[in-house]
Amino acid sequence: MTVRLAFIVAAAHAALKAQAARINELNVYPVPDGDTGTNMLLTLESVLKETSGRSYDSVEAAVKAGARAALMGARGNSGVILSQMIRGACEVLARRTTFTAEDFAAALEGAERRAYASIRQPVEGTMLTVIRDAARAAREALKEKGADLPTVIRAAAREAHASVRRTPQLLGVLREAGVVDAGGLGVAVILDGLYACVSGKRVEEEESAPEEGGAPDLEAIHAAEEAWGYCTEFFVNGFSGDPRELEEWMHGAGKSVLVVADEDLVKVHLHTQDPGRALSYASGYGRLSGVKVEDMEAQVRSRSEEEVPARELAVVAASRGEGNRGMFEAMGVLVVEGGQGANPSAADLLRAVERSGAREVVLLPNNKNIVPTAEQVAEMSEARVHVLPTTSIAAGLATMVGYDPEGEPEEVVGEMREILQGLRCAEITRAVRSARVEGRKVPEGAFIGLLDGALVAVGESVEEAAVQVCRTLVEDGAEIVTLLCGEGLEEEELGRLLERVRGLDEELEVEVKRGGQPLYPLQVVAE
């Protein structure tokens, strides 16, 4: 049996590529780094690269490869959620040998389940809602007489677009900003591409427009947690039963559980305080082999007795701007190029973590859209990865004050985390369109100040918006303010800004650093 995936992946990719720029514009905040469409497109592009020109011996092998590629290529929050949708669909299709209307409906339901499960606190009015509504529409369409695959996909796509149009009714920030959910539109457009692929018909433009985030490689994964219990691995041969039932039991028995099924062979990996109990339970499903049990706590104790340092700590950071790169590298940081408008992939970050050669790595995303990707890296790396959720380059640089490469990792990470929690971060950028945000009118071309993610300033210049932001910080008790200058901030304007900020409080300490980051002429961090 030969299975090819590239043709259908290419159709979804082409549909999304045609609409990516438009999707990027659907930010709640009218900032120039809207990249939901780009992040989703790069996630699909990773799957396309994996599958192009390749054939697989089975459906399972094909969809596993696609799911793994999606995870490795996922960028930003929307990309990570999309990768989980792809994974959920693949998990369903891996157990099937056909791609019928029923298979498609089941795959969408799998995508819905996995997407919702991947979010700790799911929010309605987002791409989660859209995939749920599309899955329900596909299931309903199956009840119609003569429903075939194109009919069911078309029903799912139409309902997805209708769901997108409803997102402002479910999420107040969308309603106030006058936009629909960008990730949800991306999901609907992907379904348009699938429909075009199976039907040979071009999707009508008006249907795409609103009205107006496989089994992982066990050898590449270790828990990003404290040494705990026994690392236990084994195979179950001649497996008889439901792998999901076994996996559920293992989750109750330990941590870092992975259960990977391959026909009648299942591999299990978990960390548990009672490996004997886990082995005894699993033996009820088949014959055990390849059993490996390692005392992780004993390993840590033995390493602590060695003359060399027990563990080494490194830092990986995402950053843009030559000045910022230079400052990070001077502090011993391994820099991955990427940030506003150009998010690095999970694979990019993972390569940097592995290149560091450290047993423990602090990962600084320095952008809210990179945080979910960084958390994926923590699950994929053999090193113990500590993700500190920095949402700006300025915050990342400030957090580095607590870094000591020779210190005890737990203490160093704790110090860096404590510094981060005490920071307030702001960004000044220019509105790329007119909008109404949090009750305030924002004209196109105005400079806006976002403080801890909330709009606090609207002005005609960087200077005006920045002074408003700094005044708020001083009123809230800030003692030290650091200005990180990016592209577009002229020396003359910076001079005036410094004079005005220092005039807010004679005891205020003001520092200036030249980072050179694009899109955001000024980032501010206060302590």
Image (cartoon, rainbow, N blue to C red):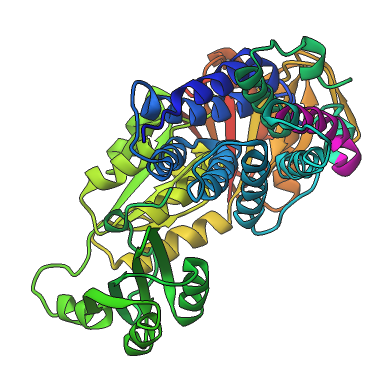
Residue located at (72% from left, 34% from top)? 184
Any magenta on residue 157? yes
Query: To which quarter of the image does residue 489 belong?
Result: top right
317 shown above or below 154: below
Q: Please state which of residues 471 and 449 is positioned toward the viewer in this rendering.
A: 449
208 shown above or below 151: above
Any magenta on residue 160? yes
Q: Position of residue 318 (x, y in %)?
A: 42, 37
Q: Position of residue 251 (x, y in %)?
A: 49, 74
Residue located at (62% from left, 42% from top)? 103
Q: In the figure, is residue 63 to the left or right of 491? A: left
229 shown above or below 426: below
Q: In the figure, is residue 214 to the left or right of 334? A: right
Q: Main secondary structure of the magenta part?
A: helix
Q: Which residues lie in the magenta part?
A: 153-172
Can you see residue 331? Answer: no
Q: In the figure, is residue 429 to the left or right of 312? A: right
Q: Position of residue 146 (x, y in %)?
A: 78, 32
Query: To which quarter of the image does residue 337 belong?
Result: top left
Query: How many tags in the picture?
Result: 0
Most extreme residue toward the front, as rendered? 146
97 shown above or below 383: above
